[in-house]
Amino acid sequence: MQSRLKHLFWATAVGLLVTGAPCLANEAGEQLYAQQCVRCHGQQGAGTEDYPSPLAGDLSVDQLAEQIRLTMPADNPESLTRDEAQNIARYVHDSFYSAIARARLEPPAIELARLTVNQYRQVTADLVGSFLWQASIGDERGLSAEYYGDRNPKGRDKAALTRTDATIDFQFGTEVPVPEIEDPFRYSMRWKGVVLPTETGWHEFIVRTEHACRLWVNDNETAVIDRWVKSGDDDEYRAKVYLLGGRAYPLKLEFSRGTQGVSDEKLHEKYKKVSEASIQLMWAPPMGAVQVIPTRCLAPFEAPPAYACTTHFPPDDRSYGWERGTAVSQSWFDATTAAAIETATYVCDRLNRLAGTNDKDEQRHEKLQQFCHKFAERAFRRPLNEELRQRYVDQHFEQLDDEEMATRRALLMTLTSPRFLFREASGGDEPQNTAARLALSLWDSLPDEELRSAAAEDRLSSDDALRDQASRMLADPRARRKLRQFLFTWLQVDSVVDLHKNSERYPQFDAHTVADLRTSLDLLLDEVVWSDDSDYRRLFLTDEVFLNQRLAQFYGLGGEPPADFAKARLDDGERAGVITHPYVMSKFAHSDVTSPIHRGVFLVRGVMGHALKPPPEAIAPLSPDLHPDLTTRERVTLQTQPPACMTCHHLINPLGFTLERFDAVGRLRDTEQDKPIDDRGEYQPQQGPAVSLSGARELAEFLADSDEVSQAFTEQMFRYLVQQSLEAYGPAVAKRLHESFVESKYSIRQLAVEVAVVSSRVGRDDDLASQSSK
Amino acid sequence: MGRHNTRRDFLRAMGLSAAVAPFLMNRPSLAFSNSSARKQRLVIVFTPNGVVPPTFWSDEEGSEFTLKESLTPLEPLKDRMLLLHGVNNSVRGDGDLHMRGMGCLLTGIELFPGNVQGGGDTPAGWASGLSIDQEIKNYLQSQEATRTRFGSLEFGVMVPERADTWTRLVYGGPNKPIAPIDDPYQMFAKLYGEMKDRENMTSILDDLEEDLAKVRNLVSAEDRGLLEQQETFVREFERSLQAEDQRAPDHAEPELPPDIERKNENMPELTRMQIELMVHSFLNDFSRVATFQITNSVGQARMTWMGIDEPHHSLSHEPDSNTEAMDKLTKINRWYCEQIAHLAQRLDETPEPGGEGTMLDNTTIVWTNELGKGSSHTHENTPFVMLGGGLDLEMGRSLKLGGVAHNRLLMSLAAGFGHELKTFGNPDYCGAGALTL
């Protein structure tokens, strides 16, 4: 509770800098305090030589007022009026007396945190996966295909044809699927590889075919769709699988045309039916529309099935704009218990494989016990001492004859331990804590084998060594996922985005378009981050957009439409990176008209990183119908005219107006209501004269060049990666990080490395800001 | 706090009514439904490949009848059985006679056209409707008073590892076959696994609390609050588990012999294990409907333990003139009958928990088969033998019903639970409605 208030204070303080509004509207109280009280109680109630104890307590304002009126000033009690006492009491209470006020005055500190929900899922996946072989996914995309001239797929060497198929989307009709197969009424296929989801959550897989099929996803034994018996007219089958974005999961699809059951040439001839054959492998990923699984999400490689914890957790605290694990709740506790059971069950169902043993192994008991030691050691992110080994593992093996039950208990205990659930729970400055912080910052997960060895061999003591590790780790798909998630969070499109638009006005802006736009943004971010220079300024300045056929048509790209997503210079150079990306423009807009206010708030809060107070009261936007002759800009100006609004809106509106040439679905326009669009705006930077910004390009150029904006980006990346406030690491760290960002020519990847290095070095115990205050 | 070191102790923690939150996992309550009204139950047992009619059907009609060779194991239960001759599975359509015998047996409706080629006839797929046990389950689950943790349980013995029309008896709906669980250990895990974890959690909470206190002392005063909260949750969890302990009834779980492999020779052992699990699932009121699928249509059990080396289905194709084969088939059916009798006896020696009489007084067992006779593949005189008092029928009789459609019998099973169906399966075979037996 205390820490939360601290942060709120900091947020408010920044907001005040921006808006210039008075903080605590009690100047009378402050003056009276200065006249009557400060000589004994000191500034901020800190006390003086004569009266050293600071003013702090838990009386309410009214109680305090009564006490002041009756007892103060000490040399002349009851000389204050009730109103005067009340004003003093309110000032004292709100400025430094109450617990809340005291918390505000404390500098932020690095706080004990539990794993966030996302981290819990990543960590459990890697914890289990660390006992299996590691997949290596190359650049090739699509699925490896085997075609057979028989009703069932056999071994690969029996295939009539093998090749790689880009997608599974075939219409065979009544013909043979490939010339190598003879009988158009009896053939089969097998497609194998991995699926590469970008989002985390339930993915619905859909197979459409008039014939027999079965599909395995992330489980090589049990098919998620088993329609090897073709029955009735059904030709679409669905199954949901929980997958974590950024990982590779094994997938296998089989198809059979012909009959199962009794194999008899005569019956085959007698009952064979001339009918169409086709097959499509589709999915509906979270926040996506039903589509044929695109080539970029399929790869012809092998990977072991990976654990994905599906237990529902309550969402993490995001009150400061980034996910943190600094609070626990009953529902979180319940979820961790359920998730421990889910995880232990998954492990126990595959115990022999994971522990490298078998039912007849004479050393099974020892091997399982050792497996539990390793499991706990990896889960706790540090070596086990004798006491922990006994407590978490050995006692169960001593008490129970049944080694599987002992294993299960050891796993359940490990997974519900504070040493697993909380970060660096036991404190200290061991290299293992550095390794754990590094892995959580870059991967949201556990140290891998290399990082564990580096910690064990004390190879993490210099910044250079840490930098080498961080650079190595950045190449891992888990780092790619984390940076992607950060940028989506930075743009405020990370969670469920409702882009429902007025269908009369924008009839083609449907779920498919929205899903494609998300992909388009994803591809743009990916391209910028993973290009050689990884230059953050390109996020603002690029005038190219990734478009597929549907988007190219919708957004009016001339020329031959692209077959799949490709970069295109849209609108003759009027586009300005993520700021005008249609997904972002559509998100910060109403269903029928634009919202300069939403866009302005997004720019102020999100991109520039300034806090804004919430509006004094909730106000619905003026309906366009009431003012049919006004443009959106004019309506917004009219509505936010009152001075109470303008304290914030003088900042919000002129920024939002610069994006007015992009309508509610992010299409470029020149007019609104037959009036030309006025997209001029302005901004008063922290330093220097006010700048006038005409349109999106000028805005983008200003943003790309602004220290304010790159500082905000640095700070937000820090918070997202580390899940602590940057202030807790002291002012020097913020400054140094920003300098290194500028020096690296704004390399996003380099910034991530520096953030990881600087934060992994510092633990709660050597928390700089709180030390300086002690 | 006390540990549960023995099974018996642990069981005290089982079968609980208001489960602790983490164990709920969005499922219906772990244990008893709320009503103290009489618990009616239905068990449908399937055995394959037809019977030998002359050694199966009694000659007489009415309450005075003599059991033939195949049914002699039921002698001690004769006054609690009903022998129903003259019930026909009249459903036609796609699929061979085994497939339809199986897929239409409990559904009373045609198979969809599909890609499974039988030994003749057109290929077919799954049944196009749900089976009567699932209909009754849905009815019972729809009411608070009869709702149980599982609703229904699908047991099996030696069901082949392939999903097709010959291996699936139970349907949750059109094209929704439900696979029986033929591994007793898997069934045990389904019934008791969640509760085992309750025992496991109970056993580790003390140590966890101690370690939490240790960790708490390692962190700064500001950070301690978070861990103190965590400790409170652990303590409350422990307390709620203890409270459940005290309220828990004392219903045993079966002791399964360890390491019984799923193979032909172990059929007798596997069957006994499944029967024990079923009896205990009723004792705990986990479910009031069960099916028990012994092998499958065209099942090839080799009853080597009785000196029969030929597989069952192959034997069933022998002509009536092969008296040696007929003897063996009679022995095979008598063995199946022994299992039914054993199930009935186990239920009859177990007092109804919280109710009157024995569990058999409240349970009706229906034993059936996909064919009337193996060599002819007829669906006429499909065997139906009923046992026990679950449906309040007048027992101790041999009835000759003269060729009624089996849909009407399926409807009378539902009617026994107070679930009056106007039709079930294909309405064309539902005639005057449920049979009055």
Image (cartoon, coloured by chain):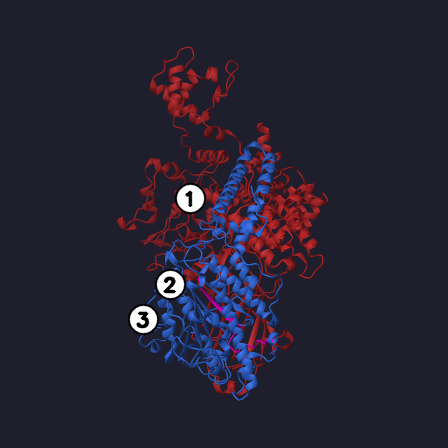
**Height in image: B53 above or below A220?**
below
| The chain in red | A
Q: CA distance from mark 2 to mark 3?
A: 14 Å
Towards the viewer: B356 or B190: B356
**Above or below B368: residue A403:** above
Whether residue B301 is in magenta: the answer is yes
Say which quadrant the C terminus of chain A sits in: top right
Residue B145 versus residue B205 in the image, above or below: below
Q: Residue at 40% x, 69% y: name it.
A: B132
Host chain of mark 2: B
Q: Relative to B254, is A231 on the left or the right?
A: left
Q: Which residues are magenta?
A: B288-303
Q: In which chain is the residue bearing label 3?
A: B
Give the residue drawn at x 42%, y 35%: A19
Extreme residue toward the front, this view: B64
Counting from the top left corner in percent of width and height, residue A614 is at 39, 39
- Label the blue chain with its letter: B
Residue type at tag 2: Tyr
The answer to which of A436 and A366 lies nearer the viewer is A366
Q: Which amino acid is tagged 1? A: Val
The residue that label 1 is drawn on is A601
Mark toward the viewer: 2 or 1 = 2
Instruction: Look at label 3 and name its amino acid.
Output: Lys
Q: Chain of mark 1?
A: A
Residue B246 percent coordinates (x, y):
49, 45
Q: For residue A655, which quarter of the picture?
A: top left
Whether label 1 touches label 3, CB < 8 Å: no
> In the drawing, does residue A341 fall left or right of residue A551?
right
